[in-house]
Amino acid sequence: MGFRRLSALIIAGAAVLVAPVPAAAHPGHEFPSDFQKVTLDDFPGEPIALAVLPDKRVLHTARTGEVRIHEPSTGRNVLAAKIPVYLHDEEGVQGIAIDPDFEHNKWVYVYYSPVLNTPSDDPATPGINEGDAPATGTAADFAPFKGHLQLSRFKLSGNTLRLGTEQKILQVPTDRGQCCHVGGKIDFDRSGNLLISTGDDSNPFFSDGYAPIDERANRNPVFDAQRSSGNTNDLRGKLLRIKVGQNGRYTVPRGNLFKPGTPKTKPEIYAMGLRNPFRFAVDPVTNVVYLADYSPDAQSANPARGPAGQGRWMAIDKPANYGWPYCVAPDQPYIDYDFATGVSGAPFNCAAPVNESPNNTGLRNLPPVEKAEVIYSYGASATWPELGTGGIGPMGGPAYDYSARNRSQTKWPKEFDGLPLFAEWTRDYVKAFHLDKRNQVTQIDPVLPNLVFDNPMDLEFGPDGALYVLEYGDGYFAENPDAQLSRFDFVRGNRTPIPVVKATPTSGEAPLTVSFSSAGTTDPDGDALRYAWDFNADGRVDSREPNATYTFTANGNYRPVLKVTDSTGRSAAAEVILPVGTLAPVVTFVSPVEGQPFEFGDTVNYEVAVTDDQPVDCADVTVTYILGHAEHGHPLSTSAGCTGSITTFVDPGHAGAEGLTAVFVASYTDAGDPPQTGTAEVVLDPAD
């Protein structure tokens, strides 16, 4: 694995749907071809994670429980499973991965929030949200909200994830009913060990944007990250490493942070002191873990509290403690702060951190704090100006493993070999990190800046050497208009066609005759195209004409797909969402209304109106309040019912930040044939 410069090549991307732009010359090479972005699924739900199968099918998940499979042979996106999940705050389906021996055993690993018996909001009491855990109380008050995230594996049969084959592997405790940081990524190393990242499961909104270390006896433990990230006897805020065997049982491989049998420790821990390590990837050659950790929210440093919020990226090549909630780095401690008195103490000792929290069940004396390779804040970084400015949403991406034996026409070129990718969710870009032999970053280059990475959520190189990306799009906790599953190809001599699909009418009761058009479909090279329509998504071609009609004889939610193929065999597909049956409900906010003045701290009364051709049950209406900030959002509360009230707030850590909004999202699924869902969103800007 070399350490090459590739600036000239990386910056040479060309936008999709425009004329090709020749790639700039890399020293010693000429590249007559370019890169192209190909959309695979324009309707992925609220996208969370992906995994590319050996046959180039792509598993991709939505937070609400859907697991879909993109099938390149037909262009279909098939619903493989709907996992029942708990959905308060950020909970739901999180990571997904396939077994290293998938071609033989067909195991798919999923990290998700099982439903359990956690309290939920009662729509009959619009003034009370029983689904929100109390901020203060006793252990008995908090007990009903004790839950867990589940790491399981399931068999994949064809395009069906068989939920009945579930083998439960590992449970990670959570304190439910409060925000935040429960996500987890799954990956495997070269030895077949499973690694999974876990968030600190701590509420960041009442600690001024600094370390949440509230130790008050009547306080919900969710406000103290010392109980999780700083706790050697807890699986949260960690990178875990295990070896899964028969029947889902696992063992702990050698070389983790704590030897098995060490009192007050969890042997599964490989790295600790992490806040929200949402995405990472294991280098397929070196076994180094490239992990990114989300930042706290303080806009500036405070000598009485600690440093400003900073995102971190680390190349983890040995077990380590990365310091949260005591330190950002060995030279950046937080200040010990008494939340009862409001008095600051001394800075924490990053060389020898001590966890004295009454919520700690682990060791008192912690390992020294390891420094991340890249640390950056909201403003321009003196060390890494290439990262720009803006929000902080770091995503650890994969390193490309180039193979001369791979005959794929879309594989990325050798110049990317060994370079880990870094995605910034809030800044809409991907970068390439150059590392030296000590895994220190020596150079950062832009990756395809002329192509769109719209809130990149997850990235993975496929067996074809192309980069697969799940994009969240702009919006909050829904299927955003720009959300998609996409593939970024290096093009050798020819480009993939660009299909366009239109359907008329777009809904109705069965029997329903629909006219389909491919008008607007193009091929960048002017090649002749072959057309293949699959109207009922059964995997069989129904028409090979550019335009066709089809009659749907039964109600259902259909995704008609058009696959187009050029003369070189390159193909792409496009779909339309076609509900045949009862109409989708129309959901609107009566109140609040867009632009309504408010101040954080106000209790906002809401009223949702639903118009439908089915009887409306207000008990099935949900309204989520989200604190919008810097192109992302923090879901803080979910209520049920057509009417209710939600108290808005902004923590001092966000106070003064630019772009703060209060977002209300309403959703309703009816009892039609088939059930249909309608949503509405209102964004309120605080009064000046």
Image (tube, rainbow, N blue to C red):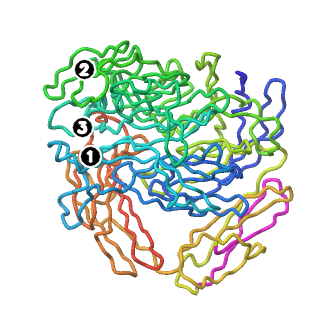
Measure the C-alpha gap from mark 1 to mark 3.
33 Å
* Percent position of residue 478, x then y: 44, 56
The secondary structure type at the circle numbered 1 is loop
Amino acid carrying mark 3 in the image = Pro
Q: Position of residue 674 (x, y in %)?
A: 48, 77
User: Can residue 197 be seen?
Assistant: yes
Rate crowding at label 2 as few (under 14), some (14 to 19) or many (20 or more) other CA atoms within 10 Å: some
Which residue: 69% across, 33% down? 11
Please state which amino acid type lies under the numbered disc 1.
Answer: Ala
Cα gap from disc 2 to disc 3, whole angstroms = 17 Å
Q: Which residues are magenta?
A: 512-536
Residue depicted at 18% across the width and 24% down the height: 338
The residue sitting at the bottom extreme is 511
To which quarter of the image does residue 618 belong?
bottom left
The label shown at residue 687 is 1
How crowded pointer 3 is (Cα within 10 Å; few <14, some 14-19, many 20+) is rated as many
Image side of residue 286 versus residue 619, left or right: right
Going from N to C along the chain, the mark reached first, 2 or 3, is 3
Q: Is residue 519 left or right of residue 364?
A: right
Please state if 310 lies on the left or on the right of 33 as rendered: left
